[in-house]
Image (cartoon, grey):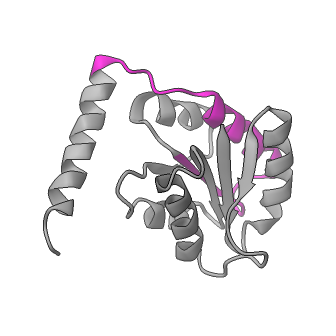
Amino acid sequence: MKVGIAADHAGIHFIKALSDYIKQKGFDAVPIGPAVPFDDYPDTAEALATALLEKKIERGILICGSGVGVSVAANKFPGIRAAVCHDSYSAHQGVEHDNMNIICLGARIIGIELAKELADKFLHATFSGEERHVRRSGKIDAIENKFLKKEI
């Protein structure tokens, strides 16, 4: 699986350690963004969400100071399901139940060891396909599609 990793200036120090860890776990880590970190988290989220939508990567890890900014920005893109996860349960449950495709981490909230654990849980999780989760996922898609058809 190709995993994109992007961070703004607050989370740039997570990139190398997470990339190395992901590679050790057998995944292909793909750094997203310029050689110099994005200063503004919306640019970080846009770069990673675009890579995911263009199928250059299959999942993504976004990092900013709290994780909240990149989550808000990434969720503006149709088809993106990004969530802040600072605990192991949410990191895998978000994929299993909600079909999350981007995990957002706060570099000012958690340390690198917890970030590695969360990445591991996120990357090893798969969408359950259970009827109730498929139904709920479909309802989310329907909400998104309703607003995509409107000119705002």
Camera-side residue of 31 and 104: 31
Q: In this view, does 136 lie to the left or right of 60?
A: left
Q: In this view, does 111 lie to the left or right of 144?
A: right
* Residue 18 drawn in magenta: no
Q: Is residue 107 left or right of residue 137?
A: right
Quarter-of-image position of residue 152: bottom left
In the rendered view, tell whether residue 97 sits above or below residue 54.
Answer: above
Image point (19%, 45%), residue name: 142
In the rendered view, tell whether residue 137 sits above or below residue 53.
Answer: above
How many discs appear?
Answer: 0
Image point (15%, 55%), residue name: 146
- Looking at the picture, how far across and down is residue 18, in whole percent? 79, 49
- Looking at the picture, how far across and down is residue 66, in whole percent? 61, 63
Camera-side residue of 96 and 58: 58
Image point (66%, 46%), residue name: 3
- Looking at the picture, how far across and down is residue 43, in whole percent? 56, 75
Q: In this view, does 146 lie to the left or right of 122?
A: left
Quarter-of-image position of residue 75: bottom left
In the rendered view, tell whether residue 127 sits above or below residue 113.
Answer: above
Q: What stretch is highlighted in magenta?
A: 102-131
Camera-side residue of 100 and 51: 51
Image point (52%, 50%), residue name: 55
- Looking at the picture, how far across and down is residue 121, in whole percent? 65, 32
Quarter-of-image position of residue 62: bottom right
In the rendered view, tell whether residue 55 sits above or below residue 118.
Answer: below
Camera-side residue of 123 and 85: 123
The N terminus lies in quadrant:
top right
